[in-house]
Image (tube, rainbow, N blue to C red):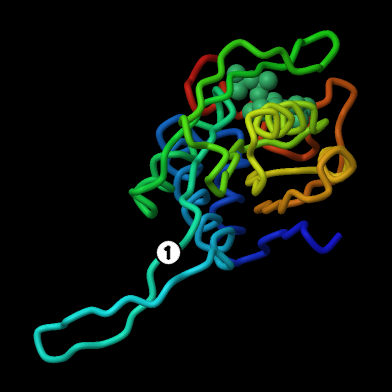
Amino acid sequence: MENVHVLNHPLIQHKLAILRNKDTGVKEFRELIGEIAGLMCYEATRNHPTVEVEVETPVAVTKCRMLAGKKLAIVPVLRAGLGMVDTMVSLIPSAKIGHIGLYRDPETHKPVEYYCKLPEDIENRQVYVVDPMLATGGSAVAAIDFLKAHGCKSITMMNIIGCPEGVAAVQKAHPDVEMYLAAMDERLNEHAYIIPGLGDAGDRIFGTK
Ligand code: PRP
Ligand code: URA
């Protein structure tokens, strides 16, 4: 699967080890989600096109490169995706932000949509969908379906922890989507939670349990 990238970087692995620990508290958990999102953003934007610009330094005129063409949009899947937004925006301040609200029905594990608001010109942007967890893939597929229905053509999915089931579901429904994961875990359990995973990302970011 050439458009699935698992970022086995030592800095990410170190932060993931702390993130997964059940004794890591809300403050540190939230900070780590942001830090990992920033490191992932660095890799996920590696092939973003650039254009040459002329810059006058205090001593000479030189040619530099800046982000080009299509502009970016960051679209967190609520709630947990919100935890990845701030660091990404600090790295790409010109990015616009959309929101897709989905929660998994506890019985069926299917995503239920409750809020969506996208930038007006979303169809002209390179869209980075962010959500810490990719479990069954239902939420990711629904979010991408929604973005494509709004004209988005260039979509990158960023998940901190995924599993083979979720990756396969996204690849089957949306083979054109580039996927970036900080870790690929083993499998899902009978409640569709990722094993070993980190538990419920939304609850750990927002301290709701
Ligand atoms: C979590 C997570 C993903 C989804 C992944 O959200 O943040 O959005 O589950 O599961 P899936 O791949 O099986 O769809 P959740 O539904 O728990 O909502 P929350 O962020 O509001 O807690
Ligand atoms: N959502 C989470 O927050 N964690 C999982 O393991 C699966 C879905």
Residue at mark 1:
67
Quadrant including the N terminus: bottom right
Which of these two is toward me, 153 or 83? 153
The part of the image, by quadrant, that contains residue 48 is bottom right
Which of these two is toward me, 182 or 78? 78
The part of the image, by quadrant, that contains residue 197 is top right
Tell me the residue at 46%/70% (across/down): 50
Tell me the residue at 49%/30% (across/down): 98
The part of the image, by quadrant, that contains residue 23 is top right
Task: Give the x, y percent position of residue 65.
Answer: 38, 75
Quadrant including the C terminus: top right
10 Å crowding of disc 1: few (<14), some (14-19), many (20+): some
The image quadrant where one finds ligand 1 is: top right
- Please, is residue 205 above or below residue 71 in the view? above
Q: Amino acid at mark 1?
A: Leu
Which of these two is toward me, 180 or 26? 180
Task: Give the x, y percent position of residue 34.
Answer: 45, 44
Task: Give the x, y percent position of residue 187.
Answer: 87, 40
Tell me the residue at 81%/17% (across/down): 109
Q: Is residue 170 left or right of residue 197?
A: right
Count of numbered circles in the view: 1
